Image: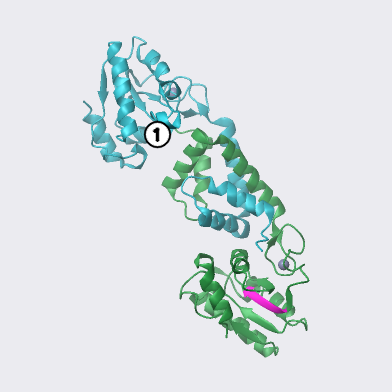
Chain colours: A green, B cyan
Amino acid sequence: MDQSPKSLEHLVQALRKLPGVGAKSAQRMAYHLLQHDRDGAVHLAQALQSAVQHVQHCELCYTFTEQTICATCADPQRDQTRLCVVETPSDQAVLERTGAYEGLYFVLQGRLNPLDGVGIAELGLTRLMERAGNGVIEEVIIATSFTAEGQATAHVIAQGLSKRGIKSTRIARGVPAGGELEFVDLGTIAHALADRH
Amino acid sequence: MDQSPKSLEHLVQALRKLPGVGAKSAQRMAYHLLQHDRDGAVHLAQALQSAVQHVQHCELCYTFTEQTICATCADPQRDQTRLCVVETPSDQAVLERTGAYEGLYFVLQGRLNPLDGVGIAELGLTRLMERAGNGVIEEVIIATSFTAEGQATAHVIAQGLSKRGIKSTRIARGVPAGGELEFVDLGTIAHALADRH
Ligand SMILES: [Zn+2]
Ligand SMILES: [Zn+2]
């Protein structure tokens, strides 16, 4: 009955893997590209391959970069005594866009989620403790989300830092409870950063 | 300020071209792919390239196919005396999935939209008239949408067929007014097809 071409079907399936894209949207996207925007499809394919090939994790802060060390870590103007811990590269990008922070970053591999197999080792907490204990960092600002897992992650980090005699602060709960940083307006984030405690 | 890697930026821009994808979703998709699903990104890139390379328009009905002639057109079991006219390949796929139609199809290049430069020539109406006048077709079922442009398209087609002494019918207005076939449930479409007038 349904005899749509195989490569069209494969495209629909591949598009469905994108976050927030269901069966209908995926089909709509595939048909749109093939009917109206084949150049866009080729361009998207190239952009995907180029990003996968060139975007890696900064060896110091683990955010996305095309170099070994990202532009922020390599910038001598940044305040080397402050380290802000976030869950993801996109949280780091959002914080950076607020313009309210001049220090350095440390990007975790998400947040604690033991049920999904994300424990302390997977998150990169060991590397964070090493980095925070480098003798230059004076304050670690914990900017994980205010979800249950983000809070648990913040708690574990604060404990670990305290044990090593390193000062930590938490961004203020101006970020709405249950909120993902990525979806919060920049003003709120800037405010939460200023109000850290 | 915003120092996100160039190839990441390009990916976000390319994703924004997808229908229904805004700036935030595009960014979310790009970060998700790079952080959690690089295999999915490579797979999507390949699926895009393969679809662009292999999916073409059937030489008879203009729907998507990987062959010169699509499976429906090539099927001798289909009723060769009925021709259903739709706006897009995805409308054709939807009608086909209802299982309520056994004839052949003719896929237009959209619907009349003079302001956007889609006139009678761009739609493929000349080819439709040739096809409908092949001496075998006894009925042309006009299944364009019930949007203003879809109605105008139906009107122009019906006039052209009538001038050539070819019978045409219009699917019933069971399809909600202003509705795109693609987003209508299959039962409604099957009903509209049975009630054509
Ligand atoms: Zn870095
Ligand atoms: Zn065909």
Q: Where B196 falls versus A173 (above or below)?
A: above
Q: Where's residue B141, x and y in %? A: 29, 24
Q: Secondary structure at mark 1?
A: helix
Image-based side of B131 in relation to B100, left or right: right
From the image, which quarter does the N terminus of chain B lie in? bottom right
Q: Amino acid at mark 1?
A: Ala
Q: Where B31 falls versus B119 (above or below)?
A: below
What residue do we see at 29% from left, 18% from top?
B159
What residue do we see at 67% from left, 72% from top?
A106
Q: Where A113 falls versus B52 (above or below)?
A: below
Image-based side of A91 in relation to B21, left or right: right
The answer to which image quadrant residue B195 occupies is: top left
From the image, which quarter does the C terminus of chain B lie in? top left
Q: Where's residue B183, x and y in %? A: 35, 42
Evaluate whether residue A137 shows in this view.
yes
For the magenta stretch, what is the residue range?
A81-85
Evaluate whether residue A115 shows in this view.
no
Q: Provide the residue designation for mark 1.
A: B93
The answer to which image quadrant residue B180 occupies is: top left
